[in-house]
Amino acid sequence: MSTKVAQWKIDEVTNLSGKIENSQAVGIVNIGGIPARQLQEMRSNLRGKADLRVSKNTLINIALDDAEKEGVNKLEEHLEGQTSLVFSDINPFKLYNMLEESKTTAPASAGDIAQKDIVIEEGPTSLEPGPVLSDLQQAGLPAGIDGGDVVIQNTTTIVEEGEEINAKVADVLSKLDIEPMEVGLKLKAVVEEGTIFEPETLALDIDKYREDITTAQARSVALAMGVNYPTKETIKPLIQKAFRESVSLGIETEIFEPEVLEKLVAKANLDANAISSKIGEDFLSDED
């Protein structure tokens, strides 16, 4: 007896396959550990630039197989854990950077690993005096009362990078409205025109990349100038260089061309003045 497949699953696979076929770039995103509120904010911020579709991995796998789009089946090996499909018509590099920039902060939960030192600055808090004072102290914070306010008496590193956040600390951080965790959509792989791109390839330092291009362009122009190779960038300075060199040659060889004549006259005038000055010095010397 065959098992009937639920209609919603058939519809879901059909919809996913259609979006896969009609998108320039299709990727797999890890959404594990992102609270619902932050995930919703990220989806909202990406609207119009990228579309996230959360679905069961088994249905995504079938959709990737069914879609008539080159290379998307390569994404199947990245279907692990809590994942989402991402669809976009921008190139994979821009998509990766956009997802990286969509990262946001989130509250800490017991068992989370601190991504960096969690430092609580000294000063007053918004908390009312009461049992919370004991909670702060048990979590390792030097807390006290000052003028009716709960205050942190010294700046304290409550959890160091790489350490596990325990339940007491997580509770205190929540009370202090501190969100020490950074969460974001982690692009695991994306396919465009049959080619699969992974984060290691897409993580470009844009500023460094631009600097390298500018440096390479400047060096290529300098090389072209050095070997007198005409290009769109070098033709004008090469003509100017050739003109200067021809004028210098004309002055050296005393060629009476219009561009040279004025400079020859000026040179002759300088030479005459130098000779006149020398004759005057010799004359005065003879008189002595």
Image (cartoon, rainbow, N blue to C red):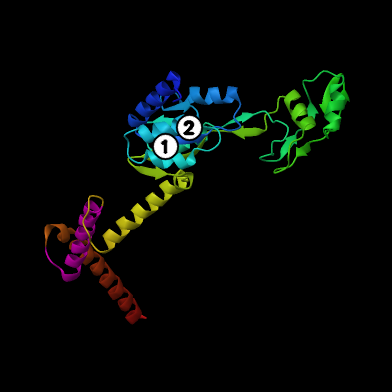
- What residue did someone put label 2 on? 58
* Residue farthest front in this picture: 1
Q: Position of residue 282 (x, y in %)?
A: 31, 78
Circle 2: residue type: Thr
Residue 238 lies in the magenta stretch: yes
Q: Vertical placement of 277 versus 122: above or below?
A: below
Q: Position of residue 69 (x, y in %)?
A: 32, 36
- What residue did someone put label 1 on? 94
User: In percent of the image, x 76 and y 27: which residue is there?
Assistant: 171
Is residue 230 toward the left or the right of residue 41 in the image?
Answer: left
Residue 68 lies in the magenta stretch: no
* Nearer to the camera, 68 or 144: 68
User: In percent of the image, x 79 and y 28: which residue is there?
Assistant: 123
Quarter of the image holding residue 145?
top right
What span is colored magenta in the figure? 234-256
Q: Position of residue 99 (x, y in %)?
A: 49, 34
**Split into 4 quadrants, where in the image is the N terminus?**
top left
| Majority secondary structure of magenta residues | helix
**Split into 4 quadrants, where in the image is the C terminus?**
bottom left
Q: Give the label, 1 or 2, closer to the camera.
A: 2
* Nearer to the camera, 213 or 284: 213
Q: Vertical placement of 221 versus 89: above or below?
A: below
User: In percent of the image, x 42 and y 32: which residue is there?
Assistant: 62
Circle 1: residue type: Lys
Q: Position of residue 232 (x, y in %)?
A: 22, 50
**Mark 1 burial class by Cα count in 10 Å: few <14, some 14-19, many 20+:** few
Sequence-wise, the earlier of marks 1 and 2 is 2
Question: Alpha-carbon distance for marks 1 and 2?
Answer: 28 Å
Quarter of the image holding residue 137?
top right
* Nearer to the camera, 208 or 234: 208
Which element carries disc 2, helix, strand or loop? helix
Does residue 89 appear in the picture of this structure?
no
